[in-house]
Amino acid sequence: MVLQRWRYITQVVEARRLQEELDELGEAGWELITAHWEEYSYGGRSQQQARCILKRPIADEDRAADDFTAWEPAAAGRV
């Protein structure tokens, strides 16, 4: 059985650029897991930004360079 390994990133994107940024990340193989909207003040104005978590599979050729692939995944509920 081959386990799928994932690489995760977080990105903070201004609301006005969100779709453009997600399109670029999607083309690079990243999949949006979740986005949390935040409000902040800049220049006396209220702005919106999304704090996003994304993932993509680790390709076979990247596994050798990835330090984390040597770790054994823990089974759910196992201590």
Image (spheres, rainbow, N blue to C red):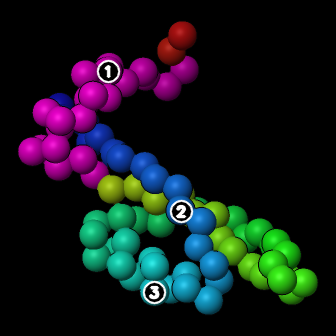
Q: Residues under labels 3 and 1: Cα distance?
A: 35 Å
Question: Residue placed at 77% from the left, 69% from the top?
Answer: 38
Label 1: which residue? 71
Left or right: where 20 falls relative to 38? left
Q: Residues under labels 1 and 2: Cα distance?
A: 25 Å
Local crowd at mark 1 within 10 Å, few (<14), some, or many (≥20)? few
Q: Earlier in the sequence, mark 1 or mark 2?
A: 2
Question: Residue placed at 25% from the left, 22% from the top?
Answer: 70
Kindly identify the amino acid type of the residue bearing the numbered disc 3. Glu
Does the magenta portion include 73? yes
Label 2: which residue? 11
Q: What stretch is highlighted in magenta?
A: 57-77
Q: Can residue 71 be seen in this view?
A: yes
Figure quadrant of residue 51: bottom right
User: In the picture shown, does residue 70 fall above or below 44?
Assistant: above
Residue 31 percent coordinates (x, y): 40, 65
Kindly identify the amino acid type of the residue bearing the numbered disc 1. Trp
Q: Earlier in the sequence, mark 3 or mark 1?
A: 3
Q: Which residue lies furthest to the front in this view?
A: 43
Label 3: which residue? 20
User: In the picture shown, does residue 19 fall above or below 58?
Assistant: below
Q: Which residue lies furthest to the top in this view?
A: 79
Figure quadrant of residue 71: top left
